[in-house]
Image (cartoon, helix red, strand yellow):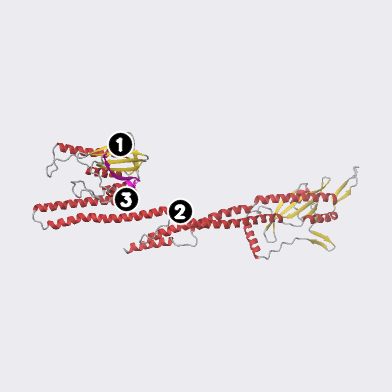
Amino acid sequence: MASATGTRNNAVSTLGRGGKKRRVSPLTLRILAVNVLALALLMAGLLYLGRYQDRLIQAETEALATEARIFASALGEGAVNRILTTPSPTGDESGERFELAPELARPMIRRLAEATATRTRLYDIDGHMLSDSRVLVGSQGRIEIRELPTPPSGDPVSRAINDLYTRLIDVVPSREGLPVYRERPGQSNPDVERALSGETAATVWRVDGAGGDPELLLTVAVPVQRYREVLGAVLLTRGGGEIDRAIRSVRFDILRVFAVALLVTVGLSFYLAGTIARPIRRLAQAADRLRTSHGRHAGIPDLTRRGDEIGELSGVLREMTDALWTRMDAIERFAADVAHEIKNPLTSLRSAVETAGRVSDPRHRDRLMAIIADDVQRLDRLISDISNASRLDAELSRAEPEPVDIGLLLTMLAELRQTVAATMDERVAAGEGDGTDGEALPQPPRVVVDVPAGERLVVPGLEGRLTQVFQNLIDNALSFSPPGGTVRLTARRSGRSVRVVVSDQGPGIPDGKEEAIFDRFYTERPAGEKFGTHSGLGLSIAKQIVSAHNGSVFAKNRQVSDGTIEGADFVVTLPLL
């Protein structure tokens, strides 16, 4: 007993922990995660900007190539020395050739580069660098000009934003496939080599910036020509700062929109979670209170006005709770009725046993023994019916319904009753008595079935239990019908249901008792019937079985034109398959 109590307490405490309040419910976190994840994936895709960056690089490269061609044309016209050649020994005419003049090219390159902020280098036909816009040659020697990096912002918020942006961009794979640019003096550039062969060459490089972050570098080399003769090559180099700034600006715009969308998404997620998780938590807490309480004050909240699935859940839980209370009330009433019904024959049995011990007259003692036998038989019948009724709910909930032909079922029951009636007729014809007072047996009522020929009236249900319903109704009709009377079984289709009427020729139902006759242990004995023949559960069991099959049953009196009652009708309605 202690072990069972401990198990129950453990189960209660476990369920109690499941219904406790949390700061944020798991359902809220799931809703938030799904909404934010979708938004984050969209943001990540937008931050990639691969095609947009490629278009910017292509446009910048084309502009740089155009600029390089202009520089090459200017150098080919204004920075060239004309050199006359002597006649050859074969007597050919003297000619001329052209070559780049470094003293003329350097000031031109410096002036051109100042206007465009582009590093410009000039190479001769042998690949040697003649001039560099970053190098100034004067009386003090060579001076190299380098652009200083932008100083970091002193604002801590700006630094934090820049650091966050850098971390986000490091995740985006945008420049890993680019070649690394390393400038080594004395080594030729591959773009310059292609330009010296008469082609225009352009390459996008990756270099390490001041902060260690990868940056873009664009190089374009074009040949310097004079009368289609390649004299050298001009190499223009420009950093991808403008491209990076354009990409950075677009990404910051995306991040701003994402921040606003994130706030809206989080707010809507919490609102959605509140409309879902909070009422579900209320229902769970109410159900837990209902489980642990000892009264009916703890009810399920009514959320049916929501008009959604949670409202439907609330309504179903309330109906289930009402059904449970109704079932508990029915069990209590059933227990009280059983105690009362069993107490009556037990009291009679006790009185007869006590009296039998004091009676000396054999006839009185035999009479008392007959009473004791009747009470024992009544108790046996009562306990059997109570046992069947108590098992009925469990059986109906476990069994699977099957197609049942109502017409065939009624015909089978009628034939069975007709066989019994034929046997009784034979005994009446033979003049047999009942073995007690020598009187002839009365002719029993006949059972007649009226079912449409060729029409199948099939319902889903349990054939054994439906047979019990109509057997109980037929037995009830036979007990009230006069000898030689008729009990009629009529079945007809009524819309999507089948309507079965069991009619007798008895005295009818007392006024106001049409509903009470279906109560447990209600008995209305026909005239001349011995007390205790019926337990009063037959009609109650029939109604319970019909209700479990989603049907209905009711009783009414059948009257003729002058208002005289000629019998009772028990009407059963069952849904068709």
Give how far apart the Cα atoms at labels 1 and 2 are. 47 Å
Judged by depth in the image, the label closer to the viewer, 1 or 3, is 1
Query: Disc 3 designates what residue?
Result: 393
Q: For the image shown, how many numbered marks are present on the structure?
A: 3
How crowded pointer 1 is (Cα within 10 Å; few <14, some 14-19, many 20+) is rated as many
24 on left or right of 415: right
Sooner in the amino-acid sequence: mark 1 or mark 3? 3
Q: Which segment did they paint magenta?
A: 546-561
Image position, residue 336 (x, y; %): 27, 56
Which numbered disc, 2 or 3, marks the residue that appears first in the sequence? 2
Mark 1 belongs to which amino acid?
Answer: Val
Q: Residue at x 57, y 54 (%)?
A: 39
Q: Which mark is residue 451?
A: 1
**What's the CA distance linking mark 1 and mark 3?**
30 Å
- Residue 2 sits above or below residue 343 on the image: below
Amino acid type at circle 3 is Asp
Give the image location of residue 147, x and y in percent: 75, 60
Residue beneath disc 2: 305
Give the camera-side residue of 291 and 561.
561
Question: Residue at image x 56%, y 55%?
Answer: 36
Q: Is residue 216 above or below residue 420?
A: below
Q: Earlier in the sequence, mark 1 or mark 2?
A: 2
Number of other residues with Cα within 10 Å of mark 3, as a class: few under 14, some 14 to 19, many 20 or more: few
Residue 400 image point, x, y percent: 35, 46
The picture places residue 170, in percent across and down from the top left corner, at: 63, 57
Is 117 in front, or is 141? 117
Q: Are marks 2 and 3 in contact (CB under 8 Å)?
A: no
Quadrant assignment for the N terminus: bottom left
Which secondary structure lies at badge 1? loop
The residue furthest top is 454
